[in-house]
């Protein structure tokens, strides 16, 4: 097997993704879990780059790391009182949760390894950037309606979140 | 690098997310688990778009973009609900907020 730097970087990103996801799931301190989640999201963006999805990788970094992670940290700060909140875990729950997720893992793994259509399939990669194409598909072609529905969804979510989280004011 | 390596990474993320949702006793940790699950799903979309569909068809990436939009909306509403629950109960443990339990 010859030395292939691309493969090396890929395995590095894969290891980083899985390792930090394990930290997210197991660590007791919730702030550390949030920062481990940041590493996971960044390395998933790296995997998107390997999949020739440059626009998707940029969106992942902007929306997840810049938006959702900050929201999560705000949520931690506003609900825990202090930043070194320890999480309690129950042994029975750990056992059953582990069983369920291991069974799911085995099931999905057997599906992946037993599907012959997915072995050595490679449709070939286009070398041009995807941003222009995504813009055309979203604004001119078949994805215009889902795009508009997504914008309405975001508006609804924004108004709903503001309405739910504000203090209730009764004027009588 | 093949399709299968991406799929294996994706199912590992998925199962870790399920484990997180099932075992954590803090609503924000559950949100982190849900984010892991959504990420694994988007990774699947991008991997199939790269390996299975022809190179000039990037529908999978667009669906993954919509997935990111949904995740953002979901996180905003989730945190608003968590804040409302915290004001009401002074805790966000899913086991202790059981007013509706019969």
Image (spheres, coloured by chain):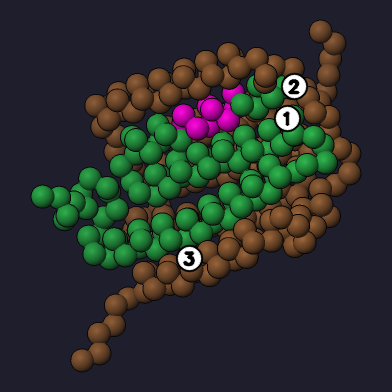
- For disc 2, the neighbor class at 10 Å (few under 14, some 14 to 19, many from 20) is some
Q: Earlier in the sequence, mark 2 or mark 3?
A: 2
| Residue located beneath label 3 in the image | A157
Q: Residue at x 46, y 72 (%)?
A: A159
Marked residue chain, label 2: A
Q: Colour of chain A?
A: brown
Q: Identify the element where label 2 is drawn.
A: loop
Q: Are marks 3 and 1 on the same chain?
A: no
Residue nearer the viewer, A94 or A164: A164
Would you say the magenta stretch is mainly helix, strand or loop? helix
Q: Nearer the viewer, residue B31 or A151?
A: A151
Magenta stretch in the rendered image? B8-16
Q: Residue at x 83, y 55 (%)?
A: A132
Question: What's the distance in space between the residues labelled 3 and 1, CA to CA?
Answer: 34 Å
**Quarter residue B30 falls in:** top left
A164 up-or-down from B17: above or below: below
Tag 3: Cα neighbours inside 10 Å, few (<14), some, or many (≥20)? many
Count of numbered badges drawn on the protein: 3
Residue topped by disc 2: A121
Q: Label 1 crowding class (10 Å Cα cut-off): few <14, some 14-19, many 20+?
A: some
Residue farthest to the right? A128
Q: Colour of chain B?
A: green
Disc 2 and disc 1 in contact, CB within 8 angstroms? yes
- Reply above or below: A131 against B42: below
Residue A56, horizontal then vertical, whole percent: 71, 47
> Can residue A66 be seen at all in this image of the molecule?
no
If the image is split into quadrants, where does the N terminus of chain A sit? Answer: top right
Looking at the picture, how far across and down is residue A147, in whole percent?
A: 64, 61
Q: Which mark is residue B42?
A: none
Residue that mark 1 sits on:
B52
Residue positioned most to the top: A1
Instruction: Determine whether label 3 and label 1 are within 8 Å by CB.
Output: no
């Amino acid at each position: 097997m010859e030395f292939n730097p691309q493969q090396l970087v890929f395995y590095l990103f894969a290891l980083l993704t899985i390792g930090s996801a394990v930290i997210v799931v197991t660590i007791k301190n919730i702030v550390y879990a949030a920062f481990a989640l940041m590493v996971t999201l960044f390395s998933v963006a790296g995997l998107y780059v390997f999949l020739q999805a440059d626009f998707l990788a940029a969106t992942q970094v902007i929306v997840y790391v810049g938006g959702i992670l900050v929201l999560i940290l705000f949520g931690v700060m506003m609900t825990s009182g202090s930043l070194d909140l320890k999480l309690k875990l129950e042994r029975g729950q750990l056992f059953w949760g582990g069983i369920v997720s291991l069974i799911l893992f085995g099931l999905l793994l057997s599906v992946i390894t037993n599907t012959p259509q997915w072995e050595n399939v490679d449709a070939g990669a286009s070398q041009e950037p995807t941003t222009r194409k995504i813009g055309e598909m979203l604004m001119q072609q078949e994805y215009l309606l889902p795009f508009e529905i997504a914008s309405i969804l975001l508006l609804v979510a924004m108004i709903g979140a503001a309405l739910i989280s504000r203090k209730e004011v009764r004027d009588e | 690098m093949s399709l299968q390596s991406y799929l294996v990474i994706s199912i590992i993320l998925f199962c870790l997310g399920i484990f997180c949702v099932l075992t954590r006793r803090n609503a924000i940790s559950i949100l982190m688990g849900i984010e892991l699950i959504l990420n694994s799903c988007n990774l699947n979309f991008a991997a199939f778009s790269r390996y299975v569909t022809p190179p000039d068809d990037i529908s999978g990436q667009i669906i993954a973009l919509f997935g990111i939009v949904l995740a953002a909306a979901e996180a905003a509403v989730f945190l608003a609900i968590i804040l409302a629950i915290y004001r009401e109960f002074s805790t966000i443990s899913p086991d202790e907020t059981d007013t509706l339990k019969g």
